[in-house]
Image (cartoon, grey):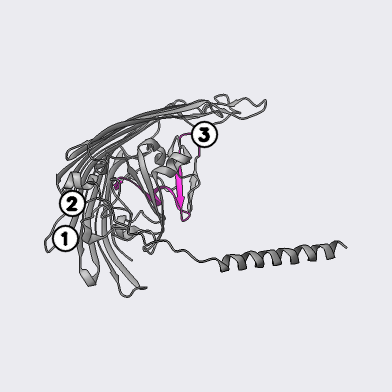
Amino acid sequence: MSLRYLYMVLLLCLLTGHSLQAQQDDQPRRTLPPVEVVPDEQPETAEDAIFGEGSPSPFDRPFSYPSLSDQSFGDADFGGLDGIMRSDRSLFDMPGLGTIVDRQQLGERMPVDMFHALQNEVGVLMQATARGQASPFVRGLTGQQVLILVDGVRLNNSTFRAGPNQYFNLIDPGQVERVEVLRGPQSVLWGSDALGGVINVVTRSASPYRGNYTGGSFVEYFSTADTGSYSRGNVEGWVGNSGLFAGGSYLNVNNLDRGGSLGRQPFTDYQQYAGDIKYNLLVADDQMITVAFQHFEQQNLPRSDRFKPFTNTPRPTFFDPQRRDLVYLRWQGLACNALFDAFTTTVSYGRNQERSLEIRNPAEFVVNTFGSNVTLAKDLCCAGRLTYGLDYYYDDVNAFRHRLNPQFPDDATYDRAGGFVNWDVDLTERLTTIAGVRYENVNAAGTIDAVSGGPKPFQRTYQDWIGS
């Protein structure tokens, strides 16, 4: 009976629907008059206010340096000249695999350090041997085999070891605009240590897109597991042809709560503070000068993998301080000559200091790094695009260790110089050829305190060609 009742209900619904449709078809149809859409007068954009109406803007997005976004070389855009790819291809068109963690994603992740900024990123494995440390693995490689850049300037130096190290965490996440990750070998473009990939941390800048403005922001993060607090304040503004961005942060981390009745884990607390400032000056409609300073310092940072709870001295190694400073001057822009259409040149000074406190055996080393690089690009029309340049970095290492030999030779020097040429051309709509070659030369010198015979100087030179 129930099945017969269901059939009757369905038949009634079909008849009713047919009847309503027939009644609607019998009524005369009415049509709406055509609507003419007239676009409103467009207001003056921020780009027109800064560069003049119709003038080409050197920026294709809210400004920060450098850019991996899709860019048109003929549209007076030079933002990506010294990005990870050193080309104008987008993430969808480039042959390698890359990702970009933008400012919105960073805000959603609420990172208090760079470990949390890239913790769940595709193709990147983050290792934290101890609190306040972070070492990214890309393509199974880490340490000195993954190149880390800050605004296109090398963070890697001659003291980076082959295994995991803590130096990626010497960047304040609050000053980061975005993080560009390119997975796979990039030695032709960036040097022989870019075996696993390249990570470029792009810092924040004032935006010329907003016209004349001033503003600021403040964020506060609190974590219950370690009762830690992260505070960051920023001020920024753009007036006329120049802009300024500055900020500072402080992080206080307490011992980690292990849960239950276990109490807190000893030697997992530390403090850090950071400050940065960046000034941009448009010297022409298509040329800009950037001056930036960054300071980052961690204090009383325990290396808990050295912790020995069953000895008479259950005390780990402490880094106090662990410090990074960076100053750079950059000039970038467009040109119209036979050699190049776009250029960027950078001179930089970096200082990494690490003081480790151990029982009866304190140690310290300071690395002063002087760097310079020039990158040029030429649009060859149907023949593609040619990118070429030179880069040079010089390390001066000062090291000290009580009782035992220092980890690195004192007054050691290390310099690397390289030049590269990269050609990018579309053969068909679906076939692209990218060919490049680099020559690199490395010189290392220092003095080793031998067990017998006194100090012995050494000097080594390495050079080779890299092709792709």
**Front position among marks 2 and 1:** 2
The reply to whether the magenta stretch includes residue 63 is: no
- Asked if residue 26 shows in the view, the reply is yes
Task: Kindly identify the amino acid type of the residue bearing the numbered disc 1.
Answer: Phe
- The residue under label 2 is 333
Tell which of 164 and 443 is nearer to you.
Answer: 164
Of the two numbered discs 2 and 1 on the same chain, state the one appearing first in sequence: 2
Tell which of 409 and 368 is nearer to you.
Answer: 368
| Above or below, comparing residue 215 to residue 16 in the picture | above
How packed is label 1: few (under 14 Cα within 10 Å), some, or many (20 or more)?
Answer: some
Q: Position of residue 228 (x, y in %)?
A: 49, 27
- Asked if residue 401 shows in the view, the reply is no
Of the two numbered discs 3 and 2 on the same chain, state the one appearing first in sequence: 3
Is label 2 in a helix, a strand or a loop? strand
The reply to whether the magenta stretch includes residue 136 is: yes
How packed is label 3: few (under 14 Cα within 10 Å), some, or many (20 or more)?
Answer: some
Of the two numbered discs 3 and 1 on the same chain, state the one appearing first in sequence: 3
- The residue under label 3 is 306
- Placement of the N terminus among the 4 image quadrants: bottom right
Tell me which segment is drawn in magenta.
Answer: 129-153
- The residue under label 1 is 340
Task: Kindly identify the amino acid type of the residue bearing the numbered disc 2.
Answer: Gly
Is label 3 in a helix, a strand or a loop? helix
- Placement of the C terminus among the 4 image quadrants: bottom left
Q: Position of residue 18 (x, y in %)?
A: 66, 68
Q: CA distance from mark 3 to mark 2?
A: 49 Å
Tell me where residue 375 sits by quadrant.
Answer: bottom left
Q: CA distance from mark 3 to mark 1?
A: 53 Å
Task: Kindly identify the amino acid type of the residue bearing the numbered disc 3.
Answer: Arg
**Front position among marks 3 and 1:** 1
